[in-house]
Every structure is written in C-alpha cells, then in structure tokens.
Image: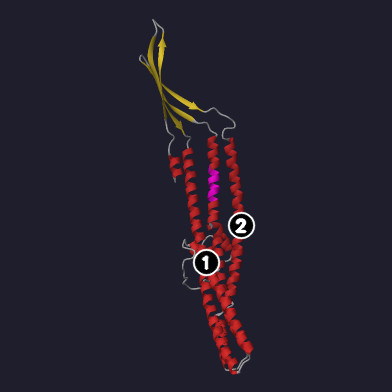
C-alpha cells in the first residue's frame, strides 16, 4: 500500500537560484548584482503514472491472495489434524476396552487353571494377551500425542499443551467427477490465482519498460535579473536519445513475462494432476469406509459377546474365543483408521482444488 502512495505522488518540482556579480568597465570598473531563478517541473507521459499505480495495486492484491491462500491451507491442515486426533482418541478408547477384556480373561484363565479346569498354557496365553493389549494401547497413545502436538502447533498453542477433540467421525465428503473438480481447481485454486496476478504484473512491467525508453522532459520558467533589467524566459530540458536507453530493462521484463507464462502452464498441469490423484484417493477411502456397514459391526459385536459367554460356560475352545476377540478389536481399529484416512484424503483433495468441497455449487458438476 505504501508503493501505491509512492506511485500516486507527482515528481517534485525543482527551484534553482544562482546569485552572482556582473563586472563592467564602461566609464570605469563597476559591479552589479546579477541573479538567475529557474523553476522546473518534470513531465510524466500520459498513462505512465496510472501504469505505476496499477502495478502497485496488483502487488497489493497479490499479497492479499497469498494471505487468503495461506489461511485456506492452514484451515485444511487443521481439519486434517483434528480428524486424525479424533480417530486416535477413538482407537485409544478401543484399546483400553481390549486391555480390560484381556485382564478379565487373564483372571478367569488363572482361576480355571488353579481349579484344574484348564492347563497352565491357558493362563500363560492370557498373560501374553494382556501384554499385547498393553503394547497396542501404548502405540495408540503415541498416535494421540503426535496428532495433538501437530494440531497445537497449527493453532499456535503450546505443542505439549492439553487438547481434547470432540466431534463426529462422520466426514463423508460430497462426490464430484474428476473433470468437474479440475475445472473448479483451475478457477479457484489460490496458487493459480496468484500466478495469474503475477502474469498480469509481468505484462504491466513490459509496458513500464517501454515507457522507460522514452526521453524525460522537464519544463519551467526562468527569471534573470539585474539592477537595470529583468529577463523572463521559458525553458525545456530533454534527455538525448540513445538506442540502448531502457533496452536492457525491456528485454528483462519481456523474458520475465515469458517465464511467468510458462510457469503458469506448468502449474496448471501439476494442479490438474494433483486433483485427479487426490480424487481417486478419496474415492478409494470412501469405498473402504463403506465396507464396514453398521449391520456388519453389530454382527461382529454379537459374535464376540457370544464367544465370551460360550467360553465362560466351557462351550467353546480357547483359540476360538481369542480369535473372536482379536477380530473384533482389530476390525474396529481398522474402521476408525479408515475414517481418519477418509478425512485426510478429503483434506488433500480440498488443498489441491483450493476450496472446500462443501462450498462447490452443484452447477459446477456436469
């Protein structure tokens, strides 16, 4: 914004004053005061000041676009870290249930072995199950610490500060075709908007370089006076032409304009590829989540509860009971991880597109 004020400011006029003495020998030597006062104002070619203001304004708009893009990328990163923390919290809760179940099983197995209803292997095996559950719980707690630290840093908080995520893991994103997403990205992606602004500035700099090749003018009145006479004049100053004046600046500006154009085309291709790749990843993540239907999860829970009752009544074997428990907890952990992957894939796609998927109007799709 300071550059805009500078560009709008007119060049300062100049005033010069040259006092002196005139020596005359007519009828004897005499001295008279002689002074010259000149006023000069530079002439700016029509359109040059407007061009400089336009360049300064585009630079301000460029900085604003950069800030908006940074805000969006930060929001996408926060959303991704939030869902990762939320999923990690669910997994920790699941692993705590698994550990509690393993300890209950260990107590039952120990009593059965002491009563002679089971072998010592069953007691040892139950202890191994407790150790494995503790290991899985510690790993899940480590994921929470990592996700919490990342989210704290993104929000400008103490990295080790307490933080609890509260929300719904249902983060199913609206579906769009890849061509529709690419079209939205080419229109709204902040990086492309910044690049387009840079291309416009490069074109304006070429025009400014052409103005630099024109001669500079300054005009103004002058007053020459002595004690006997005063002479009023009007003068103009112009720089002499030179074939190399401004030529280097024009060549540099033209080369920069071509470089920005090539960079824009490269960026368009990269963004199109990134959007297509992220859209495919989101589709795969969405399909993986749909594999875990509510009916299947309810059935799995009923199976493990039945296995627990059967084992307590000596109606099923140890291996079947352990396999049912392991399948139940591992499946739920995979389900939560799939939801976290879905949220992460959505964040990656929104980052590539440059806008939230919820903000894409239905008319943007074919």
Q: Tag 2's secondary structure?
A: helix
Magenta span includes 199: yes
Residue 28, image x, y percentages: 39, 5
Q: Position of residue 301 (x, y in %)?
A: 55, 84
Rendered-image quadrant of the C terminus? bottom right
Please indicate, yes or no, whether residue 306 appears anywhere in the rendered image. no
Spatial distance from mark 1 to mark 2, Cα to Cα? 25 Å
Q: Is residue 52 magenta?
A: no
* Quadrant in the rendering for residue 116: bottom right
Residue at position x 53%, y 50% from top? 197
Q: Nearer the viewer, residue 342 or 128?
A: 128
Residue under numbered circle 1:
81
Q: Residues within 10 Å of mark 1 (few under 14, many from 20)?
A: many
Is residue 189 shown above or below 161? Answer: above
Residue 270 is marked as 2
- Relative image position of residue 233 (x, y in whole percent): 42, 21
Residue at 59% of width from left, 62% of height from top?
Answer: 275
Tell me the magenta residue range.
Answer: 196-204
Residue 230 vertical position relative to residue 136 in the rendered view, above or below? above
From what the image shows, is residue 106 above or below residue 65? below
Tell me the chief SS of the magenta region: helix
């Amino acid at each position: 914004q300071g550059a805009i004020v500078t560009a709008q400011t007119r060049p300062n006029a100049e005033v010069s004053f040259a006092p002196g003495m005139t020596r005359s020998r007519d009828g004897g030597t005499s001295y008279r005061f002689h002074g010259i006062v000149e006023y000069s104002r530079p002439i700016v070619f029509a359109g040059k000041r407007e061009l400089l203001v336009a360049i300064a304004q585009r630079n301000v708009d460029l900085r604003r676009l950069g800030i908006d893009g940074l805000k969006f990328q930060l929001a996408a990163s926060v959303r991704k870290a939030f869902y990762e923390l939320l999923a990690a919290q669910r997994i920790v809760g699941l692993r705590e249930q698994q550990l509690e179940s393993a300890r209950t099983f260990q107590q039952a197995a120990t009593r059965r072995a002491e009563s002679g209803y089971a072998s010592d292997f069953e007691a040892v095996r139950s202890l191994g199950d407790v150790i494995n559950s503790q290991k899985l719980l510690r790993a899940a707690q480590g994921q929470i610490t990592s996700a919490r630290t990342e989210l704290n840093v993104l929000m400008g908080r103490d990295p080790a500060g307490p933080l609890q995520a509260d929300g719904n893991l249902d983060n199913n994103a609206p579906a769009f075709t890849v061509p529709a997403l690419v079209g939205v990205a080419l229109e709204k992606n902040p990086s492309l908007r910044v690049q387009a602004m840079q291309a416009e500035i490069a074109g304006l700099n070429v025009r400014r370089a052409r103005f630099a090749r024109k001669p500079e003018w300054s005009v103004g009145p002058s007053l020459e006076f002595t004690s006997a006479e005063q002479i009023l004049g009007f003068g103009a100053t112009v720089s002499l032409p030179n074939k190399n004046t401004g030529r280097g600046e024009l060549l540099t500006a033209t080369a920069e304009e071509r470089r920005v154009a090539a960079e824009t085309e490269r960026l368009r291709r990269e963004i199109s590829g990134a959007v297509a790749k992220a859209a495919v990843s989101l589709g795969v993540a969405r399909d993986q989540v749909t594999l875990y239907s509510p009916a299947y999860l309810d059935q799995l829970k009923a199976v493990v509860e039945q296995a627990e009752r059967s084992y307590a009544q000596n109606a099923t074997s140890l291996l079947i009971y352990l396999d049912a428990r392991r399948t139940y907890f591992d499946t739920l952990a995979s389900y939560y991880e799939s939801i976290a992957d879905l949220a992460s894939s959505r964040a990656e796609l929104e980052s590539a597109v440059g806008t939230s998927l919820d903000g894409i109007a239905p008319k943007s799709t074919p």
